[in-house]
Image (cartoon, helix red, strand yellow):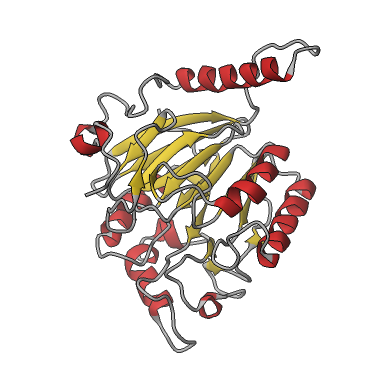
Amino acid sequence: ARPPPSQNLIANLSCAGSASPSCKLGKAMAKFTSCAKKPFAAILGDNFYPNGITGWRDMRLEEEMLAKFWVYPQLRDGVKYYATVGNHDLKPKYQLRTDHANWVMPDTYHASPMMRVGETTVQLFLISTQWGYHKNDPYMASMASWLDKELEKSSAQWKIVGTHEQIFGFMGFDHGTGLVDSVHPILIKHNVRLFVCAHQHSVHMFMTPGNYYHIVSAGFAEANVHGITKPRRPPGYYHQGQGGTAILLSKEVAHVVAFDVDENIIFTHKVTREIPQDPVSPRASADEQRAAAASSRLTELRGNGIDPADPMWLPIGSKCDRFRLRKSFINGDRKST
């Protein structure tokens, strides 16, 4: 059932400037924002293909965002688009805006104000993977320190962290070494439940060892899985094709909804704000505590109808059969075609 209209909504409009079908996906996004009282959006990089915006006189931001999204009142009126940059945004400074009616990017990493609807509060934290992707890089260290401090002082019920490139890669690109070493521990420390990214030209959702969900929402680009595809993936959802993702937030529960350009639902998933915990003795050994945490993750997945033994799981009856990965991927062929 669709959540009541007293909730927030975050729309992951990543890779928004790459392909003409994005216009059609914008229409689908408008449909899925209609149930939100206070929608907002995350633009997760690769915003204007193939080389970004190249100067202050470049009108692509206004023209392309209008054509694809702002033409729809649900995606324009009162909606803030909090943005960061991707590897195709070659001159990020030309996307910086602080006084635009819709587009918000004061820097390549920044936080939204805390937003409130009724008893529900949410804050979005955007970081950049484009300058300094290694743990010893000064930019990465400065950004990680900023993220740690901002999450610490935030009183929002939902703290959502987003960037362009993935922390963990199971389809296409590999794990992001710098993010695994620097950002991943910070998300665990502050009990972040939702991490959103783009880059991989598809739509994924799976749970990490840190008990937060890793959502890849980059289906606004032409569907194309690059690089290595790992046959052993965490249980979750893996959609190769264009699609968007919306997260509808209430005080205790987030409903993640992914959809395609034809307005079909690819998957839905319920995330509780509090991390489910299996009972464990205070005197439990480290191994016993890790086992209990793993059991908690499986309990939450099963609560959403996921069979943890089947990493290719997709919801039955949701018009998703034609979105299943090609047979070569299912059979464990490591090379994408």
**Residue drawn where x is 52% and y is 80% of the image:** 94
Which image quarter holds the N terminus? top left
- Quadrant of res 308: top left
x and y percent of residue 284 in the render? 75, 13
Residue nearest the observer in this picture, 66 or 275 = 275
- Quadrant of res 53: bottom left
**Residue drawn where x is 66% and y is 61% of the image:** 140
The residue sitting at the bottom extreme is 57
Question: 289 left or right of 326?
Answer: right
Residue nearest the observer in this picture, 281 or 242 = 281
x and y percent of residue 313 in the render? 34, 27
Query: Number of marks in the image?
Result: 0
Residue nearest the observer in this picture, 177 or 125 = 177
**Residue drawn where x is 63% and y is 63% of the image:** 109
Question: 306 left or right of 153?
Answer: left
x and y percent of residue 116 in the render? 65, 46
x and y percent of residue 26 in the render? 33, 57
- Quadrant of res 8: top right
Does residue 16 sit above or below 125 in this rendering? below
Does residue 49 sit above or below 181 in this rendering? below
Residue nearest the observer in this picture, 317 or 172 = 172
**Residue drawn where x is 65% and y is 19% of the image:** 277
